[in-house]
Each structure stands twice: as structure tokens, then as C-alpha cells.
Image (cartoon, rainbow, N blue to C red):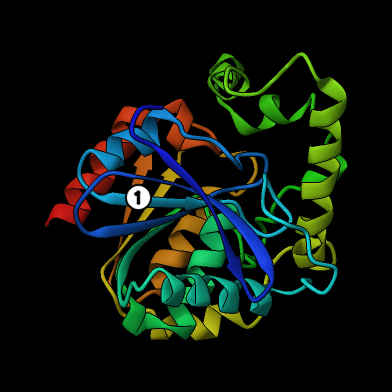
Amino acid sequence: MSNVIEEFISISNVETHLKIAGQGSPLLYLHGLGLSNLWLPFHQALAEHYKVYAPDHPGFGLSSNPDWFDSMEDFIIHYVELLDVLNLSSINLVGHSLGGWIAAEIASFFPDRINKLVLIAAGGLRVAGSPITDIFALSPELLPMVCFEDPNKAMVIASQRDMSNIQKLILQDYRERTMAAKLAWKLGYNPKLARRLRRACMPTLIVWGKNDKIVSTAHAQQYCNLIPNAKLAIIDECGHVPIVEQSEQTTNLILEFLNQ
């Protein structure tokens, strides 16, 4: 994790932890559930070409957990204010899973702040006949079996966790699931997002694992249909976490797209 700077920035009294590395054009990366406070080979590869900002969402990782933070609108405003504090007028925006949902929402409200958008296995939509798997019904032990085509690949994440303090990990998982539940417990998607995506007119890349058991590729096609300037890349032998399971291929797809 060389050359990675860690900072805490107060955004409207929400202490936001983020990792920063690299040089060049700014890239904001928004993580998925269970993937906060990580710097993976995926992040490092992006930081070889861009200045990567990887914050923990409020209620996740090392960021604070404000009681009043309970809606997608809170996340949207939080991240736009973070861009203002960082003095970033426009960015490339990459989001995975829950972070992909947040990224799609930001793109629909503030398209002028985003140069290019990458959505990786993003939630947020309703697709008839293809419901998103209820992650709240899954134990932490079962998640790798559902999230990965090859569960052994989950060890890349485990290697960055302090496995000697299981109690701490359980409490963090509970804290993060509680915040995620505020967004997704009732419906698991935003019924207004599909109509708003017409506003996300920036070049967009949709990246999905072919064997995603959490959010099926039907959602990838739906995003591609709804975003005006989107293209789709499906990755073979891959589940819900392409940034880990097929890290090199995912990174190459993103860099090729961003560098065009």
C-alpha cells in the first residue's frame, strides 16, 4: 500500500475517512458493502494513471455514523460536498455494488460534475423477474459463497482485515449493514432512479460479472438501456466482485475506457 495517504475530512460534521494515491486527473471510487477501508491491487492499478480518492461511506469503515444520515439523498449531497471541499469541479466516477448505486444517483443529479462514469455490478434498479438477492438474509460466512464465482478469491479481502479481532469485524459488519438497510431494506432499489438516468449523459461503462448471483446481468442491460451513452462489458468466470475476482481484466477495461 505504498504512497497511499489517509485523511479524515469533515463534511457537514460527518468525519469522512479516505485513502488518496496517484497523480493526474481525479477519480472518485465508491465502495460496495463489506469493502470499506481497503486498498486493493485494483485501486493501486488505477492510481498508476489517475489520482484516486477512495472514501469510506458515512456509517462504513472509519467514517463516522451520523444518526440523521438515512437516505440516498444524504449520500448524494455528502459526496458533492466532498468534491467541493477537495476543490474538484469534475471527476471520473467509479462505483461498485452499493457504491455503483450511489454513483448512478450522483450522475443523474449532477451530470456536469462527472467526466466519465463506471458502474460495476451496481444496485439501485428494479428489473422484473430478476430481483436483487436479499443480502440482509445472508450471514457474513455465506457472503463469499454468493458473491464470488470462486470463493477462494475472497481471501484477497480477508488478507487486509485483522482476523485476530473477530468481535471487531462482527461489530463493523453490523454497523455497515444497519446503514445499508436504511437505503435498501424496504425496496432494495430506488423506483425513481430509472427515469432520472436519462440525465446521466456522460460516457459510461457498465462492468458486470457474468455469474453475478447478487445483481444479475439483467440489471447490467437495464442500466445500459437507460443511460444514453453507455456500453456494456460482461466478464466471464466472475461473480459480484469483479474488482477482486477478475481484477486485472476489470482494471484494463476501465483504463481503456477512461483513456479514450
Residue 217 in the figure: left or right of residue 151? left
Q: State the residue in front, 94 or 68.
A: 68
Quadrant of the drawing holding the N terminus: top left
Please give the count of numbered marks on the rendered protein.
1
Q: Residue at x 53, y 20 (%)?
A: 156
Q: Position of residue 237 (x, y in %)?
A: 44, 26
Q: Position of residue 59 (x, y in %)?
A: 74, 56
Q: Residue at x 67, y 26 (%)?
A: 144
Q: Which residue is mark 1?
A: 52
For residue 152, what is the image quadrant?
A: top right
Q: State the residue in front, 212 or 124.
A: 124
Is residue 255 shown above or below 70?
Answer: above
Kind of residue sitting beneath label 1: Val
Q: Secondary structure at mark 1?
A: strand
Q: Position of residue 14 (x, y in %)?
A: 68, 67
Tell me if mark 1 has few (under 14), some (14-19) or many (20+) residues whose alpha carbon lies within 10 angstroms of its own.
many
Is residue 235 shown above or below 162?
Answer: below
Determine if residue 226 is in view. Answer: no
Determine if residue 143 is in view. Answer: yes
Q: State the residue in front, 41 or 209.
A: 41
Q: Residue at x 60, y 49 (%)?
A: 215
For residue 85, what is the image quadrant?
A: bottom left
Q: State the residue in front, 15 or 151.
A: 15
Quadrant of the drawing holding the C terminus: bottom left
Query: Farthest residue toward the left?
Result: 260
Q: Residue at x 40, y 68 (%)?
A: 86
